[in-house]
Amino acid sequence: MPLIPPRFDAHGDGNVTGRVGRRWSGVSHGKLATLLFLLDNGDKTTGGTERCQDINTAGVTAARDALEAVLRHPRHSFRPVAEELQRRHSTLLNCTFFRLQPGTTAANMDVRKEDEALLTMVQACRSLGVDCHDLRQKAAKVQVKLGLTNQEVDGSFFIYAENLRLSRLCVDLTPLQVLHMVREAGKVAEAGLHIKPENLTATEGLKEVLFFYLIRQLELSNQLNRIYTDRLEVLLEKVGMKDWAVSLSQYPAESRPAGHCVVFCVRTERSGSQGEIAKVRRVFEHCLGYTLTVEEDPTQATLWDTLNRLQRPKYRFYDCLVVWFMAHGTHDTLKLADGTQCQRRVIIDSFSRLDSFRKKPKIFFMASCQGRNTISIRHKRGIPVTVDGVSEGFTGFSVLPERCRNITAVSYQMDRLVASATLPHHYAFRLKDGGSVYVDTVCRLLEEHPGHNLTMVLERVCNKIHQILFSCSEKFEGEAKQACYYETTFQKTFIVPAHVKDQ
C-alpha cells in the first residue's frame, strides 16, 4: 500500500503536520532514531534461510540510509527517519494475518518476517514509551500463533540484545565523544559527510543518529556483530569509555527471558532424580529468569523432537541455551530411559548446530558417570617433573591483518561450554535422597553468585566438590574423591544473570 505523502512545515526541521506527524507527534528525535535502530538486526548472517537474510540486510540498509539522509540535510531534518518508521508501521498495519494448521511442521517453522517485525515494533515502542495501540491487537494474535509463554510476552523479548545494549551505550556517550568515534573510524570522511560539532551539540537527537549510523556502517562492512566487537571497543577506549569497552567483552544479555534451559533427566535407577529437577527449576527458572522445559525419561525420539522445537523462529531472540543431561553413562555414551545408548558427543554437537543460537553461548551440564574409575585417597610419592619449555621465534599478532580477518563464518563448536560432573572414565557420585552432588553444587553456587563470570563459578564448583570424601562399599573399597571439569570455546565472558527479583 503506497504511503500518503506527508506535509512538512516550511522550516524543514522535521516537525510534520501530515499523516507521519500525527503518528510520531510528541516523540523526541532521539527516541525516533533509537526506535528505528531497535527494529533491525545488523548481523547480515542472522536468519534461518537465505531469503530471511536478504530481507534482514535490506531492512538494515534502509535504516542506515535514513540515518545518513538526516546527517546530509543542511538543517538535519528528521523527516527520513519518520518516513522510514511510517513505511514500516503502515506495512505491519496493513499486512494480512494468517495462521496455518496448529501442530504441523509448517505452522511451527513457516513464520513470516512480518510476524517477527510486528512483535519487535510493538515491544520496541513499549520500551521507549511510544504509542502503538493500533498494532497491539494484531500482535496479540501473532503471540498466540508463535506459542509464546507469559515470560516471552511480558519481557523485553523480540528485541535483539545487542541493540538494547548499544542503545544504552548511546545514552552514556556525549555528542562530541560520538563525533570523535565516527571520525576515528573514518566513516564520516568515507561517506563524504561534514558534521559540525556545534550542530551536533545543539540539535536534539543528532547524537543518536550519528552513533547508530556508525554502528550500522560497521555492521554492513562486516566489522562488527554481537560476538566481534573489538573495533568498537578500541573506539570507546579512545574516548575514555573503558568501562563500556570491558562490558562489550561480555556476551550480550539484555533480553528477558535471559535464556532457555532444557533438562533431560533419566529417572530409572537414579535415586534423587526428582530433587535434581527441582533444584535446576528453582535456580534457572525462578532465580535467573530462564524459560525451562523438563523432559523426564528421555528417549532418542525425545532428543530429536526437542531439537526440532528449538529451530522455531522465536528462539533466535534468546541470548543463551543451557542443556542439562542427567543419566547413567560412560566416557562415550549416555544411557537413555529406553535402555538405548546415545553418543555423548552427538548430543552436544547436535544442540550446538542450532542456527537460532549461532554466536550465542551454549552451555552443557553433563551430570553423569564417565566410567568406573575412582580417585582413591592414598599417600604416594610425587613423580619428579621439569617445567615446560617456551617456544621461541613467534610472538603472535598484536593487530590481526585485515586479509586474515573474517567475522561472518563461525564454527558451531565455538561459543560452547561443556561442564562434566566427573573426569573421563570415572564415577560421578549421587546421594540417595538428594540426587547428584554435582547438580546440587552447581545450582547452589549459581544462585549465590549472580553477576559473576560463569567460569569463575565453575572453578568454585570444582573446588567444593573435590574437598568431599565419598564412601560406597558396593562399588569400591575405602574412600574416594570426585573431580569435575569443564571445556570451553567461549569467545566472550558469560555473566550469570541477575536474579529475577533484583531486576
Image (cartoon, rainbow, N blue to C red):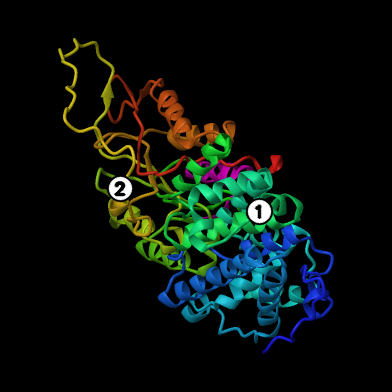
Residue 59 location, quadrant: bottom right
The reply to whether dot 1 and dot 2 touch (C-beta < 8 Å) is no
Q: Quadrant of the N terminus?
A: bottom right
Depth check: give the residue in front, 37 or 421. Answer: 37
Main SS class of the magenta portion in the image: helix
The answer to if 417 sits in the magenta stretch is no
The residue at 62%/40% (across/down) is 498
Residue 148 location, quadrant: bottom right
Residue 123 in the image: x percent, y percent?
Answer: 69, 63
> Label 2 amino acid?
Pro
The residue at 65%/59% (across/down) is 209
> Label 1 amino acid?
Lys
The residue at 59%/56% (across/down) is 163
Residue 105 in the image: x percent, y percent?
Answer: 47, 78
Depth check: give the residue in front, 307 or 1. Answer: 1
Residue 202 in the image: x percent, y percent?
Answer: 76, 52
Q: Which residue is mark 1?
A: 196
**Position of 150 compared to 238: left or right?**
right
Q: Residues within 10 Å of mark 2 (few under 14, many from 20)?
A: few
The residue at 84%/65% (across/down) is 26
Start and end of the magenta stretch? 273-293
Distance Cα–Cα, label 1 vs label 2 = 33 Å
Q: Which residue is mark 2?
A: 401
